[in-house]
């Protein structure tokens, strides 16, 4: 296939006015990416700087090499439970190996032109696993939302059991902080249009700012990034070669395939959403190549898996972004924050980040599809609920595999009857 990054096609008709819009859009989405990147990393069991470094590197590389004009790459909420499970079962070294090898699979998928095939995964499968992931993300944040200190296992029933056992140990201050932050986030979209310029500031950044300032000024006894992780470094990561751990590579096969499949689905779904908003079209196979190259390189900088991110991509578009320049500026904005404002991150309350992630989970789920099944045929309902249940109880790979097989069977049966 021809290697044609979208950025090479973006210069036609590009003007100074569009450049200015891209710069402001990039700065805006960089501010949005800051709290989300840290929250995704912490929820995955990693240090907060891992999320920021991933957003910087992935945002830059996916914008440079991607097949979508406005895609913003970085760590995604959909990966949280998978990464947490890999860390729990195999350790950090093998997470890095799994990330790199999943990148090679994505490159291979792009070379084999499988992008168009992935776009045809049934919507019912996507509804099922998206809602399942949203439930798991929300459940994983109950610990910090309540101020609990116990470690959570990676499986659904283990999480529920640990939360119930330690529920009496919740901290009222942490719970109050989380509730106030979540209420602010939910209410902000309704009131932002009535308050002028400030209404354009991303709600996740606002709540992060106010919670951090309040916790610092009043010296509130809340667990923070500083108390748990010691803050974040004020420099970018150096190039290091990941080390193999003792786990046989065959044991990592399922995690590797899961990361690759999810990365492909998420990035192409995001690109499809971007196309619908901007009335453009993306190159699916070029996008897979970019995602693959990015995930192959991220472990050399200690990064976590990355993909196209719908929330940040849509934010960039609505802020005026129209080319890969916005994604590049988003990365540079995060670089400046790391270099000049990293010391402030140590005061960020973890309860606030938990509220942000639960807010992300609420918006991530397509609950209407789950709660009003009568809009679908019986076979489609079975697909949605089976993928949803298997994703929550077992893992994403099982859910997607069963959903696709079921869809193929029902489609074949329907054609046979015709």
Image: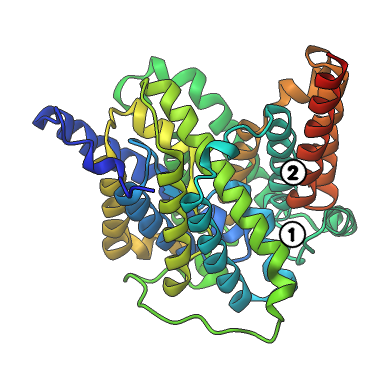
- What residue is at 30 percent from the left and 46 percent from the top? 5
Helix, strand or loop status at disc 2:
helix
Q: Position of residue 73 (x, y in %)?
A: 42, 48
Q: Which mark is residue 148?
A: 1
Residue 390 appears in the rendering? yes
Q: Is residue 230 above or below residue 2?
A: below
Mark 1: few, some, or many residues within 10 Å (few <14, many ≥20)?
A: some
Which residue is found at the position 67% from the left and 76% from the top? 91
377 with respect to 179 (left or right): right
- Residue 85 visible from this viewpoint: no
Camera-nearest residue between 262 and 368? 262
Determine whether the residue tagged by mark 1 lies in a helix, strand or loop.
loop
How far apart are labels 2 and 1 at the CA level? 32 Å
Tell me whether the residue at label 2 lies in contact with that at label 1, contact meaning CB atoms closer than 8 angstroms. Answer: no
Can you say whether 94 is above or below 408 in the image? below
Q: Nearer the viewer, residue 133 or 145?
A: 133
Residue 29 screen position, x and y as percent:
36, 40
Q: Give the answer, above or below, for where 212 lies relative to 297.
A: above
Residue occupying image coordinates x 76% and y 38%: 404
Q: Which of the labelled discs sits on residue 400, or is there none?
A: 2
> Looking at the image, which is closer to me, 252 or 91?
252
Q: Earlier in the sequence, mark 2 or mark 1?
A: 1
């Amino acid at each position: 296939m021809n290697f044609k990054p979208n950025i090479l096609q973006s210069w036609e008709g590009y003007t100074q006015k569009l450049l200015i819009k891209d710069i402001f859009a990039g700065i805006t989405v960089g501010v949005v990416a800051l709290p989300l990147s840290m929250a995704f990393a912490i929820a995955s069991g990693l240090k907060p700087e891992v999320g920021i470094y991933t957003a910087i590197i992935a945002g830059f590389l996916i914008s440079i090499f991607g097949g979508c004009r406005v895609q913003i790459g970085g760590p995604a909420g959909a990966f949280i439970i998978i990464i947490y499970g890999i860390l729990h079962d195999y350790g950090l070294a093998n997470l890095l190996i799994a990330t790199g090898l999943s990148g090679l699979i994505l490159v291979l998928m792009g070379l084999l032109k499988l992008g168009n095939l992935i776009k045809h995964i049934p919507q019912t499968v996507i509804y099922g696993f998206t809602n399942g992931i949203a439930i798991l993300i929300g459940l994983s944040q109950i610990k910090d939302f309540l101020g609990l200190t116990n470690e959570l296992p990676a499986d659904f029933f283990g999480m529920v059991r640990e939360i119930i056992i330690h529920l009496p140990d919740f901290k009222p201050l942490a719970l109050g902080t989380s509730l106030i932050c979540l209420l602010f986030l939910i209410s902000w979209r309704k009131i932002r249009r009535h308050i002028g310029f400030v209404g354009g500031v991303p709600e996740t950044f606002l709540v992060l700012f106010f919670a951090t300032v309040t916790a610092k000024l009043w010296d509130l006894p809340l667990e923070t990034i500083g108390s748990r992780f010691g803050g974040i470094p004020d420099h970018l990561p150096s190039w290091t070669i990941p080390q193999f751990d003792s786990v046989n590579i065959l044991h990592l096969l399922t995690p590797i395939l899961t990361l690759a499949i999810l990365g492909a689905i998420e990035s192409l779904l995001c690109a499809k959403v971007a196309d619908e908003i901007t009335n453009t079209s993306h190159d699916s196979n070029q996008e897979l190549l970019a995602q693959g190259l990015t995930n192959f390189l991220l472990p050399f900088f200690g990064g976590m898996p990355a993909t196209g991110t719908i929330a940040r991509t849509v934010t960039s578009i609505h802020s005026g972004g129209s080319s890969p320049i916005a994604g590049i500026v988003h990365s540079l904005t995060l670089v400046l924050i790391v270099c000049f404002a990293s010391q402030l991150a140590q005061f960020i309350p973890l309860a606030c980040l938990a509220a942000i992630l639960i807010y992300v989970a609420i918006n991530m789920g397509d609950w209407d599809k789950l709660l009003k099944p009568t809009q679908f045929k019986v076979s489609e309902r079975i697909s949605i609920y089976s993928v949803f249940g298997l994703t929550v109880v077992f893992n994403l790979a099982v859910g997607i595999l069963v959903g696709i097989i079921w869809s193929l069977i029902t489609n074949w049966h329907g054609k046979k009857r015709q």
